[in-house]
Structure formats: structure tokens, C-alpha cells
């Protein structure tokens, strides 16, 4: 019975340590992802503003496609993962740098853009991903003024294809791969140490159980000294 109980306790202990280990790894990956998104967004917070202030994107109510094409080509050459969109005041997509057929939305939600432009913006802040009907990405945005009115917004999706999934992020990062391997090794070492410690702690209980079983079966003949129970 004790052996069975010990086996169950060992299984429970190993299961708990395994769950905690997996939870730690998942938490580390998620928090790392959020940290990278926050750094990326803060680093490029003024990107859309700088583009808008140095280019005439909407002229007389008409999209300046020549200026937008220059911007698209320049940014794509510098950083292909950046996606640039010109958004109307109601959220409609007016122009974009994405290849034809890759945009899956006709409009985006302006609430994240409004939050981004507020002084109380908390990063990472995600907005709609025009390439994914259900996706959300960190971004930079700035209003395009025409006179005293807002004619639209420049909406720049940051790291469009760089952070598609946790798996691709780990595969593409030596640091994260090393951290994952280190966490796995630490988990395995912890399991071994816990198993050895548990075995030593339950040794006396197993000896006592064996003695009780021997006594019940009438085969208990040799007296045990105090030193026997200290081993």
C-alpha cells in the first residue's frame, strides 16, 4: 500500500513540477513577446507623425498617390515588415503598401488609433491588422490634416510578418531558443532532485511499513534498534 501511495505521490509531484515548468516557459514566452511589441511600438511611436509632417498625403480632398508610392517604396526597402496604410476619417482603407489581394479588410476600427493618439496611451497597443480579419498588431498612427479638418490617418503596422506566432519567434531568436533550452534543462534537473529527495524522505516510511507487514504476517523476528530508523 505504501509503495502504491509513494508512487502516487511521486506521480503527483512530478505532474505539479511539470505543469509549473510548462507554465513558466509559456509565461516567459508571452511576456517576452509583449515586451518586444512594447519596445517596437515605443521605438516607432513617432514614425507615422514624421511621415505625415514631411509629406503632402491628401491634397484638395484627393489622395496623393505619387507621394504615397514614394513612401511605400522607401519604407519597404528599409524595413519590409512595415506595412503602411492611408485610412479615411471613418476607418475606410484609402491606399496601402500591401501586395494586391493580401488585404482582407475594407476598413479598420479607429478606437485603437484614438487611444494611441491620446496622452494616456498604454503600450503595447494593438490595432486591426488589414491582412487578417481577426488579427491585431502594434502600430504607429498620426492624423492627416487638410486645413482645419482631419482628412484621414496614416496607419503603420509594425513588424507585420515578424511576430506571426510564438513558434516562429522562438525559431528566429537565438536568445529565446537558448532560454527555452535552459528552462527545459532546469526543469529536468528539478524533477531529478525532487525525485531523489522524495525517495530519501519516504525511506523510513517504507521501512516502517515493511516492519508492520512483517509483524502482521507473523514473520517479524529481529528487533530493530534506533539506529535502523536513522538510515
Image (spheres, rainbow, N blue to C red):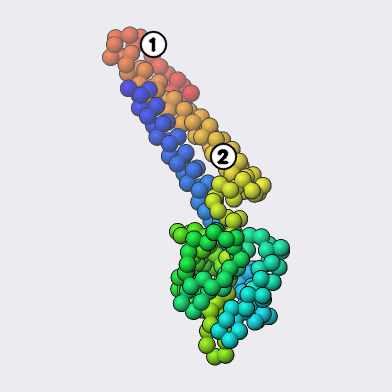
- Identify which residue, 22 or 4, lies in the foreground: 22
Q: Position of residue 1 (x, y in %)?
A: 32, 22
Which percent across, then down, holds residue 120?
A: 50, 77
| Residue drawn at point x = 62 percent, y = 78 percent | 64
Residue 185 higher or lower than 134, as above or below: above
Residue 75 percent across, percent down from the top left = 68, 67
Q: Nearer the viewer, residue 212 or 28?
A: 28
Total numbered badges shown on the rendered structure: 2
Q: Which residue is mark 2?
A: 184
Q: CA distance from mark 1 to mark 2?
A: 47 Å
Is 18 situated above or below 53? above
Secondary structure, mark 1, is loop
Proximity of marks 1 and 2: CB atoms separated by less than 8 Å: no
Label 2: state its secondary structure: helix
Above or below residue 24? Residue 76 is: below
Q: Position of residue 140 (x, y in %)?
A: 58, 71
| Crowd band around label 1 with a 10 angstrom C-alpha radius: few (<14), some (14–19), many (20+) | few
In which quarter of the view is residue 177 placed? top right
Q: Which tag, 1 or 2, sits closer to the chain's start?
A: 2
Residue drawn at x 54%, y 59% as measured from the top left: 101
User: Which residue is label 1 attached to?
Assistant: 222
Disc marking residue 139: none
Q: Residues within 10 Å of mark 2 (few under 14, many from 20)?
A: some
Q: Nearer the viewer, residue 107 or 230?
A: 107
Name the residue at 45% across, 73% down. 111
Q: Is residue 115 visible?
A: no
The residue at the point 51 percent across, 29 percent down is 196
Please say whether residue 194 is visible from this viewpoint. yes
* Front-lying residue, 100 or 207: 100
Amino acid at each position: 500500500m505504501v509503495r502504491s501511495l509513494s508512487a502516487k505521490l511521486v506521480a503527483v509531484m512530478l505532474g505539479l513540477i511539470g505543469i509549473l515548468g510548462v507554465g513558466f516557459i509559456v509565461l516567459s514566452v508571452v511576456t517576452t513577446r509583449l515586451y518586444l511589441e512594447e519596445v517596437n511600438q515605443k521605438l516607432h511611436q513617432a514614425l507615422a507623425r514624421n511621415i505625415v509632417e514631411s509629406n503632402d498625403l491628401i491634397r484638395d480632398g484627393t489622395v496623393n498617390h505619387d507621394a504615397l508610392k514614394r513612401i511605400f517604396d522607401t519604407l519597404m526597402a528599409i524595413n519590409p515588415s512595415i506595412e503602411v496604410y492611408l485610412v479615411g476619417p471613418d476607418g475606410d482603407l484609402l491606399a496601402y503598401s500591401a501586395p494586391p489581394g493580401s488585404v482582407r479588410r475594407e476598413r479598420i476600427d479607429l478606437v485603437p488609433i484614438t487611444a494611441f493618439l491620446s496622452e494616456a496611451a498604454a503600450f503595447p497597443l494593438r490595432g486591426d491588422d488589414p491582412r487578417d480579419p481577426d488579427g491585431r498588431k502594434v502600430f504607429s498612427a498620426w492624423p492627416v490634416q487638410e486645413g482645419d479638418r482631419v482628412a484621414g490617418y496614416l496607419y503603420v503596422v509594425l513588424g507585420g510578418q515578424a511576430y506571426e506566432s510564438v513558434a516562429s519567434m522562438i525559431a528566429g531568436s537565438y536568445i529565446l531558443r537558448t532560454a527555452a533550452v535552459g528552462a527545459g534543462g532546469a526543469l529536468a534537473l528539478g524533477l531529478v532532485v525532487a525525485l531523489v529527495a522524495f525517495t530519501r524522505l519516504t525511506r523510513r516510511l517504507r521501512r516502517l511499513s515493511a516492519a508492520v507487514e512483517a509483524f502482521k504476517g507473523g514473520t517479524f523476528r529481529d528487533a530493530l534498534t534506533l539506529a535502523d530508523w536513522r538510515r
